[in-house]
Image (cartoon, rainbow, N blue to C red):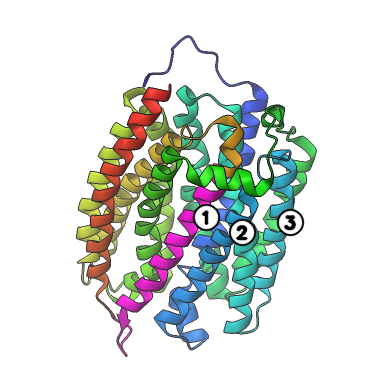
Amino acid sequence: MSEVNKKEKVFTGYEMFLIAILAFLQFTIILDFMVLSPLSAILLPELNITPAQFSLVVSVYAISAGLSGLLAAGFADKYDRKKLLLFFYTGFILGTFLCGFAPDYNSLLIARIITGIFGGVIGAIIFAITTDVFKLQVRGRVMGFIQMAFAASQVLGIPVGLYLANKTNWHSPFILIASISVIVYVIIIWKVKPVVEHLAIKKNITSFQHFKQTISKKRYITGFAATTLLATGGFMLMPFGSAFTVNNLKIELDHLPIIYVITGLFTIVAGPIIGKLSDRVGKYNMFIAGSILSMIMVVIYCNLEATPLWAVIVINVILFIGITSRIISASALMSAVPEPADRGAFMGINSSVQQFSGGIAAFFAGLIVVQEDSGYLDHYDWLGYVVVVAMIITVFMLSFINKMVMKKE
């Protein structure tokens, strides 16, 4: 079951377009979230805020996205997924524009809440569409292309965002993201076909009953539990990544874009390869390999002191290849858990669980990390050890998911 049939037809022209537009859509969502972390080195002194206050800006997005996902889960399978996508993307664009014009810390906080309410649900809708359209046997490579959004945001978005922030002000990246999103929005309206096959499966229950049924199924609960720990790593390390690089590793702020570009380029190349391998060798096997690599690199990275730029780049490249392997394989495996009639609800709740756990992780990261007057971050190594423990537990939890999927298929 882990290998793709060599005689299987290649993707149709429309399927290739759909993969591309979903990947670009994911790019705008991920970039909106990821661009905030590199701006930490600018926002902390600019807004005169503490690490705890900055982590709150990161976590409120996640928490509001989590609440929104729970509210949307009940009716997520009752509408054309394209219409649902456009509705939430409208709110996301509005929220991002508000970030671009926020005059102070409190305004930025409110804007991030609005962006999270709408943007946090979009990832779940993307995965629901992917699961509806593509078979499990090729879903690894589809996820590999879609997850290239993470790498693309590093190569294109984050360096450009940092450049604009350095040359103008920190508002510029958000205005750029919102402007690009408007173009993507128009293309979706114009070219993407309705996704309504799931509506043929009649469910004579209310939205609340559908939500209740979804959260009560044992195999779904196992998936939600695994997602809780999957979110811990990125949300704990990411918020202070740039501040750690500048203040602890002694890398110049102007050199941050170089790190993101090179790391992203390697990840863009690795993404489709990892996706294809996960279809061939097994998604869970790929997850184990990615987890082992990630754990080793997290321990190394979080214990670094002043480090040459070339060494930081090499470590980041290897770390992100490991993380990408985990994301692609876990996403493909998790997409096979829900039944067709429950996909929207499951993905919505799963996204909420991810956002909630990530938001809480980001908040506690802000409590663990202490910034000295010199800017140096204390206890960043503690975060690394917490992430490693979470990764170890997740490997065991994903084994249960894998067994369920193999039995189901």
Using a 10 Å C-alpha cutoff, classify the residue at mark 2 as few (fewer than 14 neighbours), some (14 to 19) or many (20 or more): many
Identify the residue at horizontal 39%, vertical 40% (top origin): 330
Q: Amino acid at mark 3?
A: Thr
Of 24 and 203, the residue lying toward us: 203
Residue sitting at the far right: 190
Secondary structure beneath label 2: helix
Mark pair 3, 2: CA separation: 14 Å
Identify the residue at horizontal 65%, vertical 62% (top origin): 176
299 inside magenta stretch: no
Question: Splitting the image into 4 quarters, where does residue 373 fall?
Answer: bottom left
Dot 2 or dot 1, earlier in sequence: 2
The residue to which callout 1 is attached is 352
Dot 3 or dot 2, earlier in sequence: 2
Question: Splitting the image into 4 quarters, where does residue 344 fall?
Answer: top right
Q: Are marks 2 and 1 in contact (CB under 8 Å)?
A: yes
Q: Amino acid at mark 2?
A: Ser
Q: Is residue 57 above or below residue 230?
A: below
Identify the residue at horizontal 55%, vertical 72% (top origin): 165
Task: Give the percent coordinates (x, y) of residue 135.
Answer: 52, 24
The residue to which callout 3 is attached is 90
Mark pair 1, 3: CA separation: 19 Å
Q: Amino acid at mark 1?
A: Ser
Q: Is residue 165 above or below residue 119?
A: below
Task: Give the percent coordinates (x, y) of residue 251.
Answer: 32, 71
Which segment did they paint magenta?
A: 347-376
Left or right of 119: which side holds 233? left
Q: Are marks 3 and 2 in contact (CB under 8 Å)?
A: no
